[in-house]
Amino acid sequence: MLLDAALRVLTVDPDAPLDAIAAEAGLTRRAVYGHFTSRDELVEEALAAGASRVTATLQPVDDSDPLLAIATIASSLWGQVSQVRARAQLAVRGPYRARIDEILRPLRDLLEHITHYGIQGGTMRSDVSAATLARLIEGAVLSVLDEATRTGLDAEEGDRLVIIAALSTAGLSYVDAAAYVPRVHAELAPAAR
Amino acid sequence: MLLDAALRVLTVDPDAPLDAIAAEAGLTRRAVYGHFTSRDELVEEALAAGASRVTATLQPVDDSDPLLAIATIASSLWGQVSQVRARAQLAVRGPYRARIDEILRPLRDLLEHITHYGIQGGTMRSDVSAATLARLIEGAVLSVLDEATRTGLDAEEGDRLVIIAALSTAGLSYVDAAAYVPRVHAELAPAAR
DNA sequence: ACGAACGTGCACAGGGTTGTGCAAGTTCAG
DNA sequence: CTGAACTTGCACAACCCTGTGCACGTTCGT
């Protein structure tokens, strides 16, 4: 699909020429204009499509255990590497910054909501505001996704690293963070029953 | 200076037109070609200059305490935000990736060397290789630098967050990581005697 | 077999950027 | 004052990318 191809290419080169995107989709540049009126429109829709896919994955999170919730979100993101990374890449570029921040907002809201509870509960670090912690976790997760895709980790290991990165940033030691890995899987598995 | 102006502008927009860089330096685009034969050359030299400045700062690190060494490096990086971030930004762009990786190598080598000792000593997480841990720490630090410069944190707070991010990624809990903040300052202060 | 939908190939204008040439102005040391 | 170094302003060719037009295939369902 064209939108998928766009995300795939934009992840590597945020402002790849339309030729490259079209080629990735097995089309000609000219053919793309049969579906989208402009390059910008294509990019916007690709981002929007990816975003809704990601947020859909993030819906079923249990707020009662903030740390488990964070770990679950992180794990979910791992399953959406391409979308998330494409977004992060584009966020670097000037023109899209505003648009991207808006797209990432659902994720961030979720994190902020959760960290708010967590900080009050005293389970995680309390030296920064919920908003800041949310951003730090987001950054940590993204950089792990980056590293993972660059070196081609296998799925299980990437998942594990992402979870640990999120919980480490939240203030847990490695040992405590690692303990959440199986718990996340236990949490996610029953969803398929 | 032109090189500084270049880094300053490139941090915001990795492929800003030469006009913008020249203007930042108080010059005309035409005047730049009196000092550099091409835009690429200017960028390369700006990166090289920034890199040597950064690595120079990182020299006096004590290997005996790996965690303290990591914290010290992280703290030093905080003092070089613009150079480091400009490099991270450009790393996203295709053409420069190879060049950038080369420039960041000194930093990474230092981290790998240290993390290698640390992992053997059992003080920090041992679930990943030294090389991977080095990259993870690098990523965590960069994302904090990003967040810090974006929201305009004051120097002290930024320094603190960077140190904690590095040590958290290394496997320490927030409480343990925070304990290193004053130690780093004690380590760096005598250097000015 | 027919038409509609979709894709290709080519050509073209327009905008932005780079690198260069050249004439003229400013600054500053000797 | 004079010359060298540096800068400006303008003009220009070359390049890349976008968006559009048009003629021509190819592949369907009907």
Image (spheres, coloured by chain):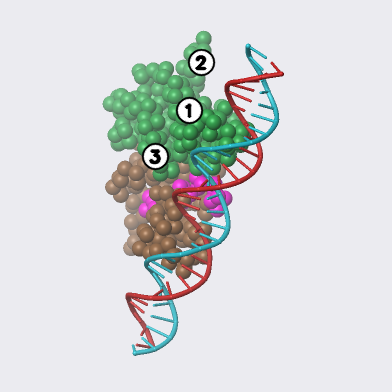
Chain colours: A green, B brown, C red, D cyan
Which residue in the protein does label 2 denote?
A: A189
Quadrant of the image containing the N terminus of chain A: top right
- Label 1: which residue? A50
The tally of labels here is 3
Callout 1: 10 Å neighbours few (<14), some, many (20+)? many
Q: Is residue A151 left or right of residue A51?
A: right
Depth order, front residue of D17/B157: D17
- Comparing B153 with A10, the one in front is A10
**Disc ID at residue B191:** none
Q: What's the magenta region?
A: B77-99
Horizontal and vertical percent for residue B137?
A: 47, 42
Disc 2 to disc 3, C-alpha distance: 36 Å
Which secondary structure lies at badge 3?
Answer: helix
**Amino acid under label 3?**
Arg
Query: Is residue D9 depicted above or below A15 in this figure?
Result: below
B131 to A122, vertically: above or below: below
N-terminal label among 2 and 1: 1
Q: Residue at x 57, y 36 (%)?
A: A30
Amino acid carrying mark 2 in the image: Ala
Helix, strand or loop at mark 2 = helix
